[in-house]
Each structure stands twice: as C-alpha cells, then as structure tokens.
Image (cartoon, helix red, strand yellow):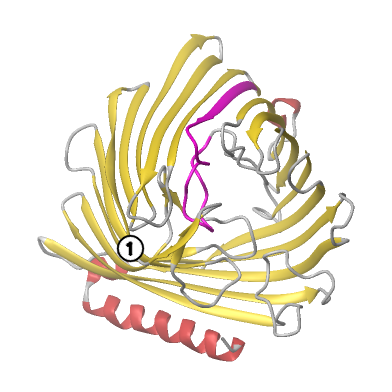
Amino acid sequence: MNLGKSMRLAALGGAGLTLCSMAQADFFADSKGDVELRNVYFNRDFRQSGARDKADEWAQGFIVHLQSGYTPGVVGFGVDALGMIGYKLDSSDSHAGTGLLPADQHGGSQDQYGKLGLTAKAKISKTEFKVGTLFFRDPVVSSNDTRLVPQTFRGALVTSQDLANFSLIGGHIDRIKANSSTDFTDMSANRIGGVSNDFSFGGGDYRATPNLTLSARYAKLENIYQQYYGGLVHTLALGNGQSLKSDLRFSTSHDDGTFAHLDNQALGGLFTYKIGSQAFAAGFQKMNGESPFPYMTGSDPYLVNFIQIGDFANIHERSWQVRYDYDFTQMGIPGLTFMTRYVNGDNVERASGGEGKEWERNMDIAYVVQSGPLKNVGIKWRNATVRSNFGNDLDENRLILSYTLALW
C-alpha cells in the first residue's frame, strides 16, 4: 500500500472516530489512541556449509492504535482501527528475507509498505464481541509480534467475564496476514502444510484460588488438525520476597479430514523460583506420537520451550530449559533488565535416519528510560545462537528501539 494512501486512511479513520464520538459521550470519553515507533535492525548469520551468507536488514515501523469506547445502552457498540507502516532503511537483494519487509519481485525487499485493519465491536455486560481485524494471544492461537509490525487475523472473537472466576473465549478465523505481508492469505499448519480458511476455537480459564488458574481449550483447523489443550499455573508464596511459579501445559492433537495423518501429544512444564530481583527457571518439554506439534503457520505456538528461534516441537523431541532473569532496580538502575536461557533438544526422529539434536542459547538486555525528555524510550538487544544436526546453524542479533506516544 502506498505510504501517502496509508496516512490518508489512518486520518480518515481517526476523523470517523471523532465524529462518532461527538454523537456519543461514552464512545468518546472512553476512547484512546497511540502511535508506537519501532526501529529494528535484524542480522541472522548462517553458519552451516552450503547455506546463504546472511539475512541482514534495518527498518522503521509505525503502528497506530485507535480504540473507541462504547455507546450507551444495554448493548454498546464501538470500532477500533490498526494502521501499520514500514520503511526500509537498509537492505540488499542478497541479504533480504528477515521478515521485516515484504519481498519485491527481484529477490529483495520493498522500500515501504502499509496496511490498515478495522474492527467492529459490541459489548453486553462483561461480554465483548469483535469482528474484523484481530490481534490477540491465546494458548491455541497467538498473533506473532516479533518483527517490525504485528501479524493479524481476520475473523470474529468473543470474550466474557460474566461468570465469577471464569474467563471464557471463543472465535473463528478465516484469514491470516503475516508480519511482512499486506494481504490476507489462507492458513496452513507448521511443518505439516495444507490449506484451510476455517479455524475455530473455544474454552476458558478458571481461577480456582487467587494463586491457581486452570485452563482448557479446543481448536480445529478444518481439514488439517484438531487440538485439545489443558493448562495449570500456580504461584506459591514463600515469604521474604520469594515465590515458586509452576506452569504446566498439555495438548493432544490429531488429524481433521484426510490431508495428513496427525498424532501428537505435547507435555511441558516450566518452574520459576523468584527471590528479590532474580528469577531462576527450569523447564521440560516432550513430544509424543508420530507427528510434530501442529500450530498455525505464522502464529506463535504455546510451548514452554518455544523461544527466540526454535520451538523444539519435532517428532519425539524432548528438550530441557534453564533460564535466569535479573532486574537492576535494586542496584539503582530502574528500567534495566537482563535475561539469558539455554534449551537443549534430542531424540528427534530425522527423515534421513539417526537421532536429531539441537540447542539454542538466548540473551536479552533491555532498558527503558525512566525520566527526562526521553522517558519511555526503550532499547533492547536480543542475541541467539542455534546449532543443529538436522536444521540451520545460525547466530542472530536484533537491536530494537521503541517508543509509544499517546495521541490523547
């Protein structure tokens, strides 16, 4: 989409919201808008023989969120808008393909792109309905937001908190728009393929106690897979600024239709001990069955060992994670945080035979300015190293500058 056209559409959307707001006080009073600026440098070096040299690009993104309130009455109505624009700052035909920018017709990346998403919404009590462009995260389907602008869905979503201690959710998606795409496309399953325009899901979370939440979901990507998910999150207070958080997840998946035979059971657990400004975590993940873990291509899988690059969800794979987090606030540097983790996977069934093994190491250093003229400006460095005897060997660095400005 042409940049000028994108800006005009965004302006029209904002004007439309303002005019409607003048007619309905609640619609206006509860509305909000902001623009998020993201400057992303992405470098991925491929280390195995016979691979391309690297993917290396730099881009600037703008994400405008406009959210109305609701009109008065038993049923309140509203509208949201999501505008996204991306600029290429540095790239080349030989180093394109980072996912920051759409591809051009010559093997490189487009200079700029833009997209606009509109969402109609209605609310009854504590139940909310949305239709149109959707951006949300859920155990069975999650929007990916790890590039210049987020990935979105097209469909309908309902959420409800009318029942005490319950959060219910259900929805239907018929198209997906990738981070670096301006077009909605059909859906497929990661590592499995297939094409579908029908993804349905539903379930809920039950807060059994203030420290214990139980979750259940069902999802179906028509003609490709069906999936059942169950989860448990419990936090045990240990006193003196200490706690132990247990995050357990289980899913079972099988085929839907005749596209491919699917059989997967995924079990994962992550246990985090927090003391003061430090957190120590250990996790385990195991794939059972004759298939890899299925999830919608382009979305994020809800797995404890899905990290910066890998998901450790191959056939029969088992993997372990260790992680360490530190918040520098107690050292007098509020806004500075550090994270490092390591995941090792083995027992992978390889098509060529033998045991597949892989490992990944991540490190994040982030800082958000706390005061002064640059308040809320964030900078993050993300580093990853991956080694595998059946996939890519690569080193990756991402440098992200971000700032969110409230429009009103």
Q: Residues within 10 Å of mark 1 (few under 14, many from 20)?
A: some
Residue 203 is situated, as x and y percent measured from the top left of the image, at: 27, 42
Residue 112 is situated, as x and y percent measured from the top left of the image, at: 67, 81
Q: Which residue is mark 1?
A: 198
Residue 270 is situated, as x and y percent measured from the top left of the image, at: 54, 24
Identified at 72% across, 58% down, the residue is: 401
Identified at 35% across, 79% down, the residue is: 18
Q: Is residue 62 left or right of residue 373?
A: left
Across the whole image, how many numbered discs are drawn on residues?
A: 1
In the image, which residues are magenta?
Answer: 280-303
Viewer can see residue 408: no
Q: Which sits in the foreground, 52 or 24?
A: 52
Q: Main secondary structure of the magenta part?
A: loop
Identified at 43% across, 60% down, the residue is: 135
Residue type highlighted by circle 1: Asp
Identified at 43% across, 52% down, the residue is: 260
Q: Is residue 168 left or right of residue 180?
A: left
Q: Is residue 344 left or right of residue 23?
A: right
